[in-house]
Amino acid sequence: TIFTTNTSSLSISKLAEYTGRPDRVVGLHFFNPPKVMRLVEIVWGDKTSEETVKTVEEVSKKMNRIIIHVRRDVPGFVVNRIFVTMANEAAWALERGEGTVAEIDSAVKYRMGLPMGLFELHDLLGGGCIDLSYHILEYFREKLGEAYRPAPPFERLVKANYLGRKSGKGFYDWSEGKTNEVPFRAGRTFDVLRLIAPAVNEAAWLIERNVATPEEIDTGVIYGLNYPRALLRMADDMGIDIIVNRLKELYESYKEERYNPNPVLLRMVEEGKLGRKAREGFYKYAPGLYEFVKLKIDKENKIATLLLSRPQRANALNPTFLDEISDAVTMLEKDPDVRCIIITGEGRNFCAGADLVAFAQGSVEAVMEFSEKGHNTFTKIEGLSKPVIAAINGPALGGGLELTLACDLRIMSKKAFVALPELNLGLFPGWGGTQRLASLIGLSRAKQIILMRENVDAETAFKYGIANYIVEPEKFEEFVYEIAKKLAEGPPIAYKLVKKVMCHGNQPHLRAGLYMEAASGGDVAVTEDIAEGIMAFMYRRKPEFKGK
């Protein structure tokens, strides 16, 4: 018999002491709601046997769970250690006047891209979980020291019995049926690094003690907290030296031990492992080593498959993702073992388009840079000398459809659909949708799809001329590969010339149109309508556009 516990914070080793067989006790921590959240933490007690771990791992796999191992019994395990300490940092920032509840939540929800603001989440999860986090932090305080004590806002709310929506008040006022929407641009000036740096420091603490690997920590925050991106990947993008410097600033200001940079981070800086800019941080970076792109090269058939791999966010495109696609297709263009490229999506979606985080910066420059990056990447795909197939395995929305329009052929699964829904958000198609779609199917049809925000199913896409082929889902991959093999057998030099002549000869005005499209992106970046559109999308309501 094996004893497992779903506790999110209690010591596995302590519980095991009361059983008389501590080697058969293990933590199996699921996340709510377990029907939706596939992550499970397997938490090893001090005396848990490898046989016990292996058994519960096999059971978890049969349950189709995403597993991370917590190899030492530490407070908060992995996911709650990151989440609760980050929430506490938000509360400390509130207490110290670094931002208001709305400003901090806005930065977290829209600029970091988390599903909810940290205060919003505490008010709404289970009707309110302020008391739960407070008690976990008190446990952290007992086990880890005074630096981990609950921030005063948590303490005040618990003492007043303001525990969230269920009690009528928490960080927000929920009395008399009030609803609270986090304002879109309130967090423009709040320093999100102030929350991220301490969270990375906690992750480094876990790595230092061999509690979990960087990959396991990142899996935990993605599938346990619904983060839009892995925490340590974000750290690598920001720069480990930047993280360390921010921690030093916080330590100098507040003299709290939790801000003292962990030796793991200091060693990384000393060794020059500063993240993506140095080609190594928590992860290594080089052509073919990507965060969001997976490559498979079939040398025998001379076919490369570029997999858009951000399934937890429907393969939505952020700046790093676009950079990786651009780097990957450049590499494939030069590879003599590749004569045809397939681009498809991992999971149920092809690509949901642009990640909305870019539009929350409140900066015309940031939006213009993002727009230009997308244009440059898709134009590069369009200009490749090798045939490119868009294998549309699921929904291709916004920038996802625009990516397919830059490909030579589009093959759709009959379960897929395409759309340019940007107007629903107060945006407009900004990566070629207004130009390439009109060139492909005519101005009138393109206007219909864009202005009416229509979802176009596979049959209709074939009828309109968007899709070259439509295929039953069970035959989709096989059919795509047969087309790719036929293309790969063709003459490379002739392909290059045909594509060049067709691209430039039949589209004399496309470049001017694409330039106008990119230049117009900044015009909508700071409108009230885009803020209203994105907030309405987040809160699943109908937008009320005012033309401002």
Image (tube, helix red, strand yellow):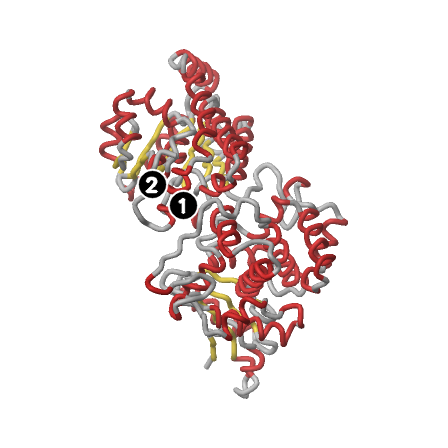
- Tag 2's secondary structure? loop
The crowding category of the residue bearing disc 1, from other C-alpha atoms within 10 Å (few below 14, some 14 to 19, many at least 20), is: many
* Residue type, label 1: Ala
Give the quarter of the image for residue 308: top left
Q: Secondary structure at mark 1?
A: loop
Which residue is identified by label 2?
395
Would you say 15 lies left or right of 444 here?
Answer: right
Residue 310 percent location from the top left of the image: 46, 46
From the viewer's perspective, tell me whether residue 506 is left or right of residue 359: left
Total tally of numbered discs in the picture: 2
Residue underneath mark 1: 314
Which sits in the foreground, 403 or 172? 172
**223 or 139: which is nearer to us?**
139
Look at 36% across and 57% down and name the residue there: 179
Q: Is the residue under label 1 in contact with that under label 2 (CB below 8 Å)?
A: yes
Residue occupying the point 51% across, 51% down: 103
Q: Can residue 481 be seen here?
A: no
The CA span between labels 2 and 1 is 9 Å
Q: Report x, y in % for residue 77.
A: 56, 68
Is there any visible trace of residue 323 in the rendered image? Answer: yes
> Which residue is at a point 55% across and 32% down the rendered structure image?
327
